[in-house]
Image (spheres, rainbow, N blue to C red):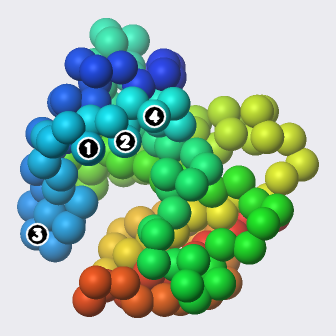
Amino acid sequence: MDLMSHKMNEQYAKEVLGWKYDQPYDFYDNELTKESLQELLNGSYYAVVNTENKLIGFFCVGESAQVPTGHQFGAYVDGYIDFGLGMHPGETGKGNGYEYCTFILDLIKEKYKNFPIRLTVANFNKRAIHLYEKMGFVKSKEFNSNNCSFSIMVKV
């Protein structure tokens, strides 16, 4: 899987906002609204494409990768680089997650040298948690938001 990343543009953002996942992953479904489009175009999101320029997924860094409610539980102490990611629904569950995440992590490590990396994952997403643990992330904190439980995972 040869991948490249680009700053998120409007075309890719609209495609991401139209993705629909099977249950229980439909938790990650979005709607195309002015606000959701602005979020994806705020400068912290990147599109991940293959050599045919097909959108495989996206990732974001910084505050956009945080669940806002987590702040009231002290989940986001300073000193970490937060990242979040999404993969095209047609690409999930095919065994490409490790390679995909490694590609993203390599980009983040290159840009933010010497910073520990942190992510937030919904606890029902056992598939993702298993992958993150395989990549060396460990759970450091949990919190609840809107009837969903989340884990903070860190890699130093």
Q: Give the alpha-carbon distance from disc 3 to disc 2, as whole Å.
A: 24 Å
Check disc 3: other Cα within 10 Å, few if <14, some if 14-19, many if 20+: few
The numbered disc on residue 35 is 1
Q: Earlier in the sequence, mark 1 or mark 4?
A: 1
The numbered disc on residue 39 is 2
Residue 48 in view, yes or no: no
Q: Are marks 4 and 2 in contact (CB under 8 Å)?
A: yes
Q: Give the alpha-carbon distance from disc 1 to disc 4, as whole Å.
A: 10 Å
> What amino acid is labelled 3 in the image?
Gln
Q: Give the alpha-carbon distance from disc 3 to disc 1, as whole Å.
A: 25 Å
Q: Which of marks 4 and 3 is nearer the N terminus?
A: 3
Of the residues tagged 4 and 3, which is closer to the observer? 4
Secondary element under disc 4, as helix, strand or loop, is loop
Residue on which the image places disc 3: 23
Secondary element under disc 3, as helix, strand or loop, is loop
The numbered disc on residue 42 is 4
x and y percent of residue 91 in the render?
25, 42
Q: Quadrant of the N terminus?
A: top left
